[in-house]
Image (cartoon, rainbow, N blue to C red):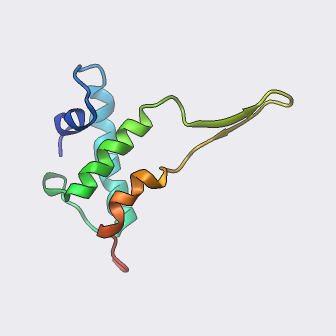
């Protein structure tokens, strides 16, 4: 899976984010491999993993994952995990043991 596939899947038409995509796509493929306890080859990813990589890339491109804040004693909280609607694409590829 290359960055052009990801750009097509999430509707990016410019080259503005190419440097980011070049860095993050292999990391998300590795994340999917770890999550599923399965070794995926980047050139032959299953469809669900491709969807995960595209959705996770799009999710990470949104502003900072800020989930809440407070005005009194300044409190911020951030999302550090992918939401289930993104990771659900990986469940059918999970193995019990590696």
Residue 3 locus on image (x, y percent): 21, 36
Displayed quadrant of residue 32: bottom left
72 or 39, nearer to the observer: 72
Q: Position of residue 55 (x, y in %)?
A: 35, 43
Tell whether 50 sits left or right of 75: left
Rendered view: 76 above or below 39: above
User: Which residue is at 52% across, 50% downward?
Assistant: 81
Residue at the image position 33 percent from the left and 77 percent from the top? 98
Q: Is residue 8 above or below residue 39?
A: above
Name the spot of residue 59 as percent of width and height, x first. Answer: 42, 39
Q: In which quarter of the view is residue 46 placed?
A: bottom left
Numbered label tally:
0
Q: Residue furthest left?
A: 43
At horizontal 26% and vertical 26% (from top left) the residue drawn is 12
The residue furthest bottom is: 97
Q: Is residue 45 above or below residue 1?
A: below
Camera-side residue of 25 and 60? 60
Residue 30 in the image, given as x and y percentages of width and height: 32, 55
Outermost residue on the right side: it is: 72
Residue at x-position 28% and y-position 35%: 10
């Amino acid at each position: 899976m290359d960055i052009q596939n990801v750009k097509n899947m999430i509707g990016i038409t410019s080259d503005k984010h190419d440097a980011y995509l070049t860095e993050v796509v292999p990391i998300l493929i590795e994340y999917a491999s770890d999550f599923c306890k399965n070794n995926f080859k980047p050139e032959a990813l299953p469809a669900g993993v491709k969807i995960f990589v595209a959705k996770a890339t799009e999710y990470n491109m949104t502003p900072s994952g800020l989930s809440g804040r407070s005005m009194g004693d300044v409190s911020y909280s951030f999302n550090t995990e992918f939401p289930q609607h993104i990771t659900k694409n990986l469940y059918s590829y999970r193995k019990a043991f590696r």
